[in-house]
Image (cartoon, grey):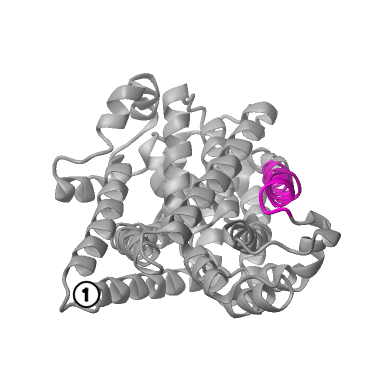
Amino acid sequence: MKNHYKLMLGLITGIVLGAFVHPYQEIYWIQKTNELLMVPIGQIFLRLLFMIVVPMVFSALVLGVYDLAKNQGVGKVASKTLFYTVIASTFSVVIGIGLVNFFRPGQGFKVDTSLFQTTKSNIESIANNAKNSKTFAQAMVEIIPKNPLEAAVKALEGEMLALMFCALFFGFAFYLYQKNAEDVKELKIMGIFEEVFNASLKIVELAMKIAPIAVFAIVFNTAFKFGLGIFESLFYFSAVVILGLLIQQFVVYSALLKFVAKRSPLQFFADTKDVMLYAFSTSSSNACLPKSIETAEQKLKLTPSVSRFVLTVGATANQNGTALFEGVTVLFLAQVFGVDLSTTQQLQVVLMCIIAGIGTAGVPGGSLPLIMIIMNGVGIPAEGIALILGVDRFLDMCRTTLNVSGDLVIAALVDEKKPNPATL
């Protein structure tokens, strides 16, 4: 059985069994089974993900920025790629957060945060974090860390944005050093970062193997405590994510293709339908890279040197669908947990989602650790991520399709070779 089917089975079984024993919460052995078995299993899974967040994010961002700057130099192709990537990611996150604020799919659910205890936070501290949020100016200043090691230590307590900035700056600085050192063809430390990133991905892969059991345990715990009411919002949550992805795909991308790249959106989507279907089935931007390059060169007729650079970097650095999903998930769970995020905190979420798009692994489940970090940064219990794990595989298929499509759109925008006007 494929892992996404196991996740769905774990979700459904957890809901059914948890709801079944919900009326019997006072029975001692049922209480102890939940307390001594279900809760620890869920916590072990979450801690495995938390464990690799800092090394994974730092190494991915350093590598992403370094490669972006090194290939083709810090010149026209790289600057245009970065510009359009930020623009597209900003649109996607703003669309997602706007839809969540408009439809409010998580509103009206009362969640006892004792169900999702973190080691250092409870309902009072969560409420205080929301009320005592930093001003926008203060938040912008504190993006630059005085002590990067301290930012790394406190990354799980809200300092992740500062660590991200440090990684971005180091990645660019490594490029400048390598560029100016005539006798250095490649920095050895980049190989170390590559190995750290690959090891982090392997840990995520191992953690996802026990995810079905963990999902069962966490969801059982939820249904045992609250019954079925808490799960009603999953349908609305999924609908909001899919609506946001459709708007990004067929409104934002179409406008960029028509007015900037001077290409027919209908022809573009027709030419790329095969790779988008492949992306939907694999849920992996990295796995789609060879097919994307082939499509760009043979069907879209893009300049090979441009398309290979943009698509290779984009497999990691241009994750529009993932950025949108992260923004929607964070605000949805804030509504579920009753955490009222201020405008400043929502802007912080937008910024973190855009930056996190560079550091998100192009593999199934690669966004989950970063979502938990963003949640921690604005005072939302990160364990709440368990509520959406059951539908994450299907939504991962949808957002990966947008990620891969977005890579091809960016490549078309960067490429200066325009198609035949007759095709417009």
Whole-percent x and y of residue 158? 31, 39
Residue matched to label 1: 187
Which quarter of the rendering shows the N terminus?
bottom right
Span of residues in magenta: 237-262
Q: Nearer the viewer, residue 320 or 134?
A: 320
Whole-percent x and y of residue 5? 67, 70
Q: Nearer the viewer, residue 136 or 252?
A: 252
Whole-percent x and y of residue 403? 60, 59
Q: Residue at x 35, y 44 (%)?
A: 118
Quadrant of the rendered structure where residue 282 is?
A: bottom right
- Residue type beneath disc 1: Leu
Is residue 348 positioned above or below 323 on the image?
A: above
Q: Nearer the viewer, residue 256 or 363?
A: 256
Q: Is residue 124 visible?
A: yes
Which quarter of the rendering shows the C terminus?
bottom right
Q: Dot 1: what SS?
A: loop
Q: Please, what is the dominant secondary structure of the magenta stretch?
A: helix
Q: Residue at x 74, y 64 (%)?
A: 419
